[in-house]
Amino acid sequence: MAEVRLVNIKKIYPNVETKKKKKKKDDMPEKKVNLQITDEGVVAVQEFSLDIKDKEFVVLVGPSGCGKSTTLRMIAGLEEISAGELYIDDKLVNNIPPKDRDIAMVFQNYALYPHMTVFDNMAFSLKLRKTPKDEITKKVHEAAAILDITEYLDRKPKALSGGQRQRVAIGRAIVREPKVLLMDEPLSNLDAKLRNQMRAEIIKLREKIDTTFVYVTHDQTEAMTLGDRIVIMKDGFIQQIGTPQEVFAHPKNLFVAGFIGTPQMNFFRNAKLIKGANGYSVEILGTTFELTPAQQAKLREKNIESQDVVAGVRPHHITLSKDGIKSKVDVSEMMGSELHLHLDADGQEVVSVVPITESESADIHHGMEIGFGFAPELMHLFNVETEESLF
């Protein structure tokens, strides 16, 4: 129902203490690159640009304090935009109040009125708009049916479980039929089982209502399962934008590689990229891996020379091999159908995920000597200084 366009959006929280300390500025060396605290104040969001298509589900994900919720609140109009432009349906809305933006927001803490019934909570915004009673009843019942909460319409929030309250909060948002539905970590207060159920409910909801979703979470599993595209943020900056598969298979830098994927990617920080007469190879813990023709072509295209690199390999891609890199088992974790092995290879910690069906995995125990390896095509290489991907 709406396209959302953010152009070089910036958010600065004024720092009143900065002016008091300004007299010391002349004695300090000037540093203005990537600073989060400047003379203007604390910079929460830096040069954020993103085009969200009509009916697209975009997820903003990143660690706490990265600026994702602040960005969402600027879209909602709950935070003032310090610089840049925000468009909804090609209309500049920087100075338009939240009530006139045709958006709805679902908060982390539900924000339900405790003295009202579920029906009245869901109908509240429609009553403020002076919507006819029969239309209010119709819209509330339609939303309740979609969310499977019809039987709770006469109850008050205190009589509902956390998952049911979150459904009511979502229902209150969708009865307005907003152009854009904003969701700020709506599942973070739920236990693991309820979170899984509600993730599935949100996926179903997305198919039933025609609106644009912008969803904020710190949980990369939610991001990977819900989003058409994922925006990964760190320290107010966008690190990468792409589909779940793109950011998983082709991380742009070391941060994205480590943030996306569970368990976290293994990083070999003492690896060496060697450019020889016959092409490129990588040396890791004394073992040489010849790179694939596709990897060789990418490195040649960028004219990459021999250098120290950080090599990354996902735990699911680490396989056990008698002839592989020697290591000892530190920890063996049984995870249902998988065994998570924490290996020590000459001081380098390596995590391997092994299917429990493999017969050799049954006898793996602490202190056992074991070899491991991986296919070169599954390796990621990063520049030591810039931390950017070499592929």
Image (spheres, grey):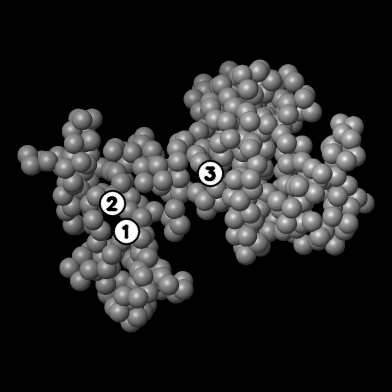
Question: Mark 3, mark 1: which one is toward the viewer?
Answer: 3
> Is the residue marked by circle 3 packed among few (<14), some (14-19), or many (20+) residues within 10 Å?
many
**Quadrant including the C terminus:** top left
Disc 3: which residue: 227
Say if residue 37 shows up in the picture.
no
In the rendered image, which residue does mark 1 sit on? 317
Residue 331's tag is none
Q: Position of residue 329 (x, y in %)?
A: 34, 72
Residue 381's place in the image compared with 88, above or below, is below
Say if mark 3 contacts mark 2, CB within 8 Å.
Answer: no
Three-letter amino acid code of the residue under disc 1:
His
Residue drawn where x is 70% and y is 51% of the image: 146
User: How many angstroms separate mark 3 from mark 2 (CA)?
Assistant: 24 Å
- Give the number of callouts: 3
Specify few, some or many for label 2: CA neighbours under 10 Å numbering under 14, 14-19, or 20 or more.
some
305 over 219 or under it: above or below: above
Q: Earlier in the sequence, mark 3 or mark 1?
A: 3
Residue tagged by mark 2? 378
Contact flag, marks 1 and 2 (Cβ < 8 Å): yes
x and y, in percent, of residue 147 in the image: 71, 53
Residue 157: image quadrant is: bottom right
Residue closest to the eye, 201 or 109: 201
Q: CA distance from mark 3 to mark 1?
A: 24 Å
